[in-house]
Amino acid sequence: MRKQIAAANWKMNLTYPQAENLLTDVLNAQIELKEDQQAIFAVPSPYLMMANAAVASKDNYFIAAQNCYNKESGAYTGEISTEMLHSLNIEYCVIGHSERREYFGESNQMLAEKINLCLEFEITPIFCCGEPLTIREAATQNNYVENQLRESLFHLTPDQLQKIVIAYEPIWAIGTGKTASTEQAQEMHAYLRSVLAKQYGQNLADNISILYGGSVKSGNAKELFSCEDVDGGLVGGASLIAADFIKIIQSLK
């Protein structure tokens, strides 16, 4: 059974006291997650230890790093290695978020290297993929996103791939005033699963969680998550408001 996941991406937001308060407010809601449900908080790196301690006694609540570097160690001032994350008992890491690709020029090959290092240090990658507006308008989004998967993931063995979580981000629907419909979300998720099935077999594809990352809010989460191939969400702005993220967690199927 696929994991149903509500993943918060706090990005570069919140002071330390604000982060503590937000996490406390969400955890105090006492949401009892089922065995196949998870809540994950991708927090800024200075808050990793605090956040991990906060969820330590909660079943199916986890902390993720927002990024890691594609080298194991060395003279890379300011970067964070997967070995460091592993030493902090961090179990998840967001890889290839659209902002990392756009602002920091991260290539599919670099992301493949990050994926390898995450798996080496027993960290589950939340691998992000998705197309910008120009690609969507040209109706070439399927080929574009399939290429992202092929170049960053398809060197993995089946055993390795089943340890990956995928998050689809329709970049064209984030901050553009355009909205991705529930049908468009389901359509792309089903396509991604078909690409995985073609490469690795239907059984493995049916067990990969694919999250939706297109402006998930408390008001649309339940409808989005009800789609057959949508297994939860990677949530940005709405995850910074405790009441909203609580509702999003409660919307998991």
Image: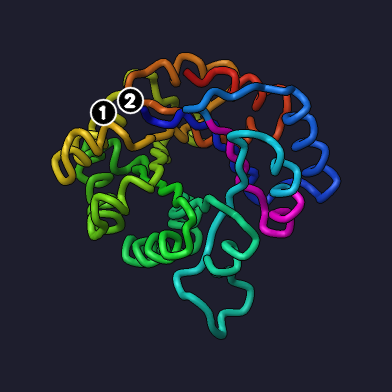
Where disc 2 sits, the SS reads loop
Which color scheme is applied? rainbow
| Quarter placement of the N terminus | top left
Q: Nearer the viewer, residue 35 or 172?
A: 35
Give neighbour class at mark 1: few <14, some 14-19, many 20+ (Cα, 10 Å). Answer: some
- Asked whether residue 35 is drawn in magenta, I would say no
Question: What span is in magenta?
Answer: 38-50
Q: Residue at x 59, y 23 (%)?
A: 248
Per the image, the residue denoted by label 2 is: 229
Q: CA distance from mark 2 to mark 1?
A: 6 Å
Q: Earlier in the sequence, mark 2 or mark 1?
A: 1
Picture coordinates of residue 85 (x, y %)?
59, 62
Q: Is residue 247 above or below residue 49?
A: above
Q: Is residue 26 left or right of residue 99?
A: right
Where disc 1 sits, the SS reads helix
Q: Residue at x 29, y 54 (%)?
A: 153
Q: Dividing the picture into quarters, in which one does residue 65 lie?
A: bottom right
- Asked whether residue 48 is drawn in magenta, I would say yes
Per the image, the residue denoted by label 1 is: 190
Residue 138 is labelled as none
Give neighbour class at mark 2: few <14, some 14-19, many 20+ (Cα, 10 Å). Answer: many
**Dots 2 and 1: beta carbons under 8 Å?**
yes
Q: Residue at x 50, y 68 (%)?
A: 69
Picture coordinates of residue 14 (x, y %)?
76, 46
Q: Residue furthest right?
A: 17
Q: Is residue 25 above or below residue 152?
A: above
Q: Is residue 131 left or right of residue 94?
A: left
**Three-letter amino acid code at disc 2?**
Asp
